[in-house]
Amino acid sequence: MAFTLPPPALAIVRRYRTCELTTINKDGSPITWPVSPRLLDDGRFLITTSIGLPQKAFNIRRNPKVSLLFSEPRASKVAEPGAVLIQADAIAEDRIVSDPSSPPELADYFVENIFARQPAGAFMSTWLGKKLFPAYYMRVLIYATPTRIRYWPTRDFGAAPQELEVRRVG
Amino acid sequence: MWAKAAKAIAGFREGVITGLDASGYPVSVRQTSLPYDAKRGELPVIIPSALGMQAGAANLLCHAHDDKLWNLRAISVKGRLEQRGLTWVFVTTAYEPQSQLAMVGKMRRSMASYLAKRNLPVPQVDFDAVKRLWARAKQIQDP
């Protein structure tokens, strides 16, 4: 991994249920969505988007600059609920993945970050779920490589955050 | 003038303001109060100078979920960030409320368009794999 997070910051990144992902629109304006990313062992973040909501992927293919703000602690049981802001370069794959068990990191993402945390999501496998949201499991994979990380140890977001070191890899 | 935006924002206790820094990367800061002025469409926001935020295009996202990551709610307001002296203000430029029903239709149309533009058939989802992953997830005690 190209960075080391203090344990409380790592807990935030691993346990917060959502973060705020921002991509950049064609007109240069930022657009932000709540998403549930997964921190991979190599330090990248895996994010996925359905082909029913492809704007994130379109924006990243045009401009790879993104940010992820982990700032919503609900349900995370994090003892020190601050925030982590990650700026990153992202890629959005061309392929559409419709087998959630492959690649392995996608299986882990669905099991640990989505299904275990969102039990009502089983609705998407029901007859009605499939009818209403046929694209739910048709995913584009997005990988974000951090370039800059800042950390607020507390919820005083008016204070200057701590800058954490990110080493360039490759 | 921005009554609909004000009503939507009032449904949330907090929000996230995002703009861009000098290198063109997005920068987000959570706001723990949302004193939105419905007449002016303005929201004073707190942004630490260390973030290097630049005046210009911005947005406000408010979202919420319950303890089981369900009952998801979100609104997005377009605007711009202005620096007035030592303070920052988010100025609304557009807000379009969207119903969940409209979202369902939009997602279906986006899927069809995505596939049609690439001349791709509708992918077959491996629901046996989905079932296996759900079985794994049910073994997790403290997600």
Image (cartoon, coloured by chain):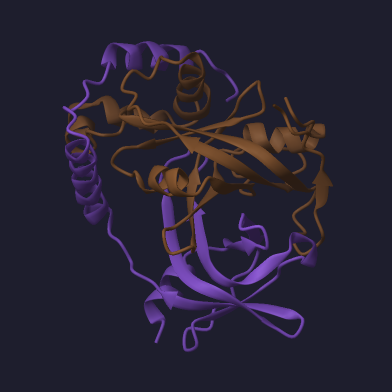
- Residue at 44 percent across and 58 percent down: it is A25
Query: On screen, A8 above or below A162?
Result: above
Does residue B65 appear anywhere in the picture?
Answer: no
Q: Quadrant of residue B135?
A: top left
Q: Closest to the observer: B110 or B37?
A: B110
- Residue at 51 percent across and 13 percent down: it is B139
Position of the C terminus of chain B by quadrant:
top right
The percent coordinates of residue B80 (x first, y second) are 54, 74
Does residue A149 appear anywhere in the picture?
Answer: yes
Left or right: residue A92 versus residue B143 is: left
The percent coordinates of residue B118 (x first, y second) are 22, 35
Q: Closest to the observer: B112 or B16?
A: B112
User: Color of chain A here?
Assistant: brown
Q: Quadrant of residue B76?
A: bottom left
- Residue at 31 percent across and 22 percent down: it is A98
Q: Closest to the observer: B133 or B25?
A: B25
Query: On screen, B132 above or below A20?
Result: above
Query: On screen, B66 above or below B86?
Result: above
User: Color of chain B here?
Assistant: purple
Left or right: residue A42 versus residue A154 is: left
The percent coordinates of residue A153 (x first, y second) are 80, 47
Q: Closest to the observer: A147 or A71?
A: A147
The percent coordinates of residue A65 (x first, y second) are 57, 48
